Image (tube, rainbow, N blue to C red):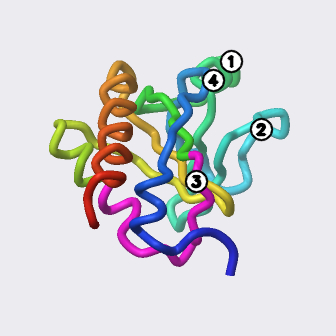
Amino acid sequence: MSGETSLRELLKTLSATLVDGIYVFAAVPEGSVPKDVAARMVFSEAEGTTLILLREEAEAHGIDHEFPCRMITLNVHSSLEAVGFIARIATELARSGMGVNPVAGFYHDHLFIPLGREDDALRVLDRIAQDSTISDD
């Protein structure tokens, strides 16, 4: 198994990076993703294909989109089997009045935060890490 599973270690070593660009979510019919679109994520669902891509790219290709957001990468290699990590983060962000759309990659988790709330989210993440170094979770 790859990655950290200890919730305490994940929280204690948590750091985050705000990724450049404004991202959006879009849905296109299955099999209709333009070949030259460099989506950050492509996920097939029964109703169609979900894309997360840069807003400028969606607009350039005439792809209808929603939820302008910023991407924050969590710089800790969390295991895909880690328990409670994203739940803890989502709970703390909710306490600050913001939703989050998390995406798990093999190496890192990524948070899609409403545009304009990215600085708030980074402060919450920093507080989680700081609180975890001084308390027993």
- SS under mark 3: loop
Q: Does label 2 or label 1 sit earlier along the sequence?
A: 2
Identify the residue at horizontal 38%, vertical 47% (top origin): 129
Q: Quadrant of residue 67?
A: top left
Question: Residue shown at 72%/47% (left/top)?
Answer: 32
Sequence-first tag of 2 and 3: 2
Image coordinates of residue 14 in percent, x first then y, are: 48, 49
User: What span is in magenta?
Assistant: 75-88
The residue carrying pointer 2 sits among few (fewer than 14), some (14 to 19) or many (20 or more) residues within 10 Å by Cα, namely few
Which residue was labeled with disc 3? 76
Q: Sequence-wise, which precedes: disc 3 or disc 4?
A: 4
Q: Nearer the viewer, residue 55 or 129?
A: 129
Q: Determine whether label 4 and label 1 are within 8 Å by CB.
A: yes
Position of residue 111 measured from the top left corner of the image (x, y, whole percent): 47, 44
| Left or right of 134, for residue 57 | right
Q: Which residue is mark 2?
A: 34
Mark in front: 2 vs 3: 3
Q: What's the amino acid at mark 2?
A: Pro
Residue flagged by tag 4: what amino acid is it?
Gly
Q: Residue at x 45, y 52 (%)?
A: 102
Q: Is residue 11 magenta?
A: no
- Read off the residue under disc 4: 62
- The quarter holding residue 21 reads top right
Within the image, what quadrant is residue 116 found in?
A: top left
